[in-house]
Amino acid sequence: MGKVLVVDDEESIVWVFRQLIEGMGHGFLCSATAERAIEIARSEQPDLVFMDVKLPGMDGLTALEDVRRVCARAKFVVITAHGSLDTAVRAVRLGAVEYLAKPIDLERARTLVEVTLKGVAVNREVEKLRGASGGLGGIIGKSPVMQDVFQKVAAVAGSDASVLLMGESGTGKELLARAIHYNGTRASGPFEAINCASIPETLLESELYGHERGAFTGAVRQKPGKFEVADGGTVFLDEIGEIALSAQVKLLRFLEVRQFERVGGTEVVAVDVRIVAATNQHLEERVREGRFREDLYFRLNVVKIEVPPLRERREDIPVLVAYLLDLARGPGITSEALDLLKNYAWPGNVRELKNAIERGVVLARGGPIRPEHLPETVVSPRPPGESDVEARVRELVEKLVGGGTPGQLFRQVEARWEKALLRRVLETTGGNQVKASELLGINRMTLRKKIEQYGL
């Protein structure tokens, strides 16, 4: 629960606030003067301060600045008997979240206490999570979209609600799942992760629910599944959108009753596990297409957290680079190289950025990462949607334009590709010109002339 400091020289006002705040279960502090309020704020570090504007001695608005200095985390509400626009504007500029006019509206005061302290609690939890690893579970981000993700994770970590993480590959969904687990009530329990897309359908059921000895060829002993091993903890179902419809039916049943039978067994096993699922698929579309059960989707989607791709939070790239350089023990990066990283689209997201930094540190050999140490895809990125062939043509054109003969660009490019094509087809046919001409769809004599022309 939070601590609330009320600064007012009217005993009746203080009494009303005491009844309200203690009745809500929060700690109550009070002072009749601004000078004493500063001392209390310094020693008690309240979460919320109600500050009267008119006080004996130092006035409330002046004191607000001093209290903020000794208690930076506190939120402020200004109390005034003569509400005016000037007072409100000055109070907000000094950091107050709201102001109350006398006589006090108790319901409004109650709402302010409830909403403000709830926000303080969530922010405190976010800072606790973030402080453990320089970010939230190893995920770094100062952008508004990532701050929103941190807020949601902090809010849901303490519950047992199922969570669905949605985002592209490489965005850090498993790290978020671990953050939810290790910062929640199940932190002392096991965390079991399984990639549903990497396990054949015939084996997935055994991996999740376990099997009895003799259940199938190779089942030489009883084996517990992920749900049984994770009893009291969390199971992370990665790539949940890839599981077959037949497996979805049994998973839905498990989510409803938290009971199952091992493959080949009849004993009912009951477990207490939390489910965090993740996917890079649009599950709503798969539901519409009939490839994912709607009832299972609703069971998993109690709380949905969308993890943004790196290209939508480019302001986080410098912070991420600094973090990854520290992990890789790299000495630094030049501004030119950092600009390239900030301008790249990162289709592989943070995972791709991590690989690029590790590569750069190795190639830099103890020096700062320079552009030449970065992957070619970062240094010379392709336009969106460009294929491999289009990329090679673009590179060839860029090379020939500067030194080619004017008016001969088409023939120069055509010759490069035609020679490479003929060589590859002849290698495929073992030098058999008849078969090569049939594959190419050209006359054998034409092929022979081209072979002589290119010296093949």
Image: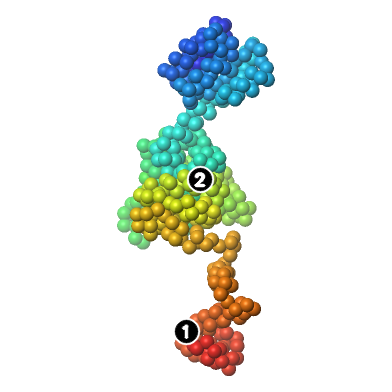
Q: Which residue lies furthest to the right in this view?
A: 85
Q: Nearer the viewer, residue 215 or 129?
A: 129
Find disc 1 in the rendering and name its residue: 427
The relative height of residue 178 versus residue 371 in the rendered view (above or below) is above
Is 95 displayed left or right of 260 in the figure? right
Q: Nearer the viewer, residue 192 or 437?
A: 437
Q: Which residue lies furthest to the bottom in this view?
A: 445
Q: Nearer the viewer, residue 381 or 159?
A: 381
Q: How crowded is mark 2: few (under 14 residues within 10 Å), some or many (20 or more)?
A: some
For residue 24, the mark is none
Q: Which residue lies furthest to the left in this view?
A: 220
Amino acid type at image mark 2? Asp
Q: Which of 110 and 103 is in front in this view?
A: 103
Residue at 38%, 57% in the rendered image? 364
Is 148 displayed left or right of 266 in the figure? right
Residue 198 visible from this viewpoint: no
For marks 2 and 1, the one nearer the N-term is 2
Residues marked 2 and 1 touching at CB (< 8 Å): no
Element on which disc 2 rests: helix
* Numbered marks: total: 2
Which of discs 2 and 1 lies nearer the camera? The answer is 2
Q: Where is residue 80 in the image (x, y as percent from the top left)?
A: 62, 14
Element on which disc 1 rests: helix
Residue 371 visible from this viewpoint: yes
For residue 316, the mark is 2
Q: Position of residue 275 (x, y in %)?
A: 47, 43
Amino acid type at image mark 1? Glu
Residue at 45%, 52% in the rendered image? 334
Residue at 47%, 84% in the rendered image? 427
Residue at 45%, 40% in the rendered image? 136
Q: Distance between the residues labelled 2 and 1?
A: 49 Å
